[in-house]
Image: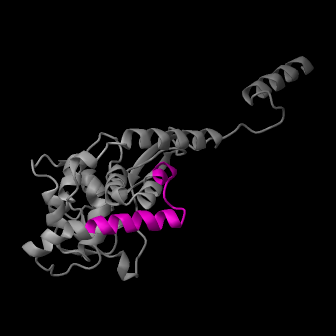
Amino acid sequence: QQQQQQQQQEEAEQANGGQPNRAPRLTDPCRGVRCGAGRICSVNHDENKAECICIPECPHELDPRRKVCTNLNETWDSACEVHRQRCLCNAHDPLCRGERVRHVHIDYYGYCRQMVECSESDLADFPRRMRDWLFNVMHDLASRNELPEPYRALEHEAETNLTKRWTNAAIWKWCDLDGHPHDNTVSRHELFPIRAPLMALEHCIAPFLESCDPNGDHRISLQEWGKCLGLEEDDLTARCAEITKTDESERNDIEAAV
């Protein structure tokens, strides 16, 4: 009997990685799982696996700055509510508000409002203001040490070489918008981070971005981006591959350390 108990103890230690008298290490199935907007990771305890489900309930927002205006020209309480409804409708959940909201998306932040029409003169002047705005944002991020390392060389070069001021700012924002996958084009979906915050402030942002896609393929190349900003194509160099490689290398180092 003593020999049998010893054998059972050895088997238990082997199951615990050779550590005696320790409970088995439990791992969270949701660790490292990324769910899309409007979804959260939930553990299916019957099968002990992770599942992405629609957010059960969004936080009640009182801050008017959390309001969003949708493509239906309706003011919704928050971005969470929009993404949750899309998830529910795609999952054919009874809580879906109807077919009309299946493809609802955020048009801009804040309450819906009557947008001022963008005149030809305003649109003609917009690239200049956009260039200045991009550089100022890049500069402010760098001064607060919030600009990612791969982009700091671009900002420093723009500071020391005035001929690179607008060009480097344009390259930075275009590379920043070219998310996953990094395919050297910026899709309409990837334009959201720059379009939605500015819609309520800049009445020309929508027609300006439309002008950046003259061939109507719903993708903006670096050359198209530079042209609609009024920059010379010869001054633009696709440095995103180098930047992306550096950024991903740093991210992998961080994940390995964790």
Q: Quadrant of residue 252?
A: top right
Relative to residue 168, is residue 211 drawn left or right?
left
Which span is picked out in magenta? 130-153
Rendered location of residue 111, percent (x, y) = 26, 79
- Outermost residue toward the right? 2
The part of the image, by quadrant, that contains residue 27 is top right
Main SS, magenta residues? helix
Q: Nearer the viewer, residue 124 or 18?
A: 124
Q: Residue 67's x, y, as percent?
A: 32, 76
**Residue drawn at 19 percent across, 47 percent down:** 219
* Residue drawn at point x = 40 percent, y = 67 percent: 137
Q: Identify the image quadrant of the C terminus.
A: top right
Which is more toward the observer, 219 or 226?
Answer: 226
- Where, quadrant-wise, is the N terminus in this rendering? top right
116 relative to 160 in the view: left or right: left
Is residue 221 visible in the rendered image? The answer is no
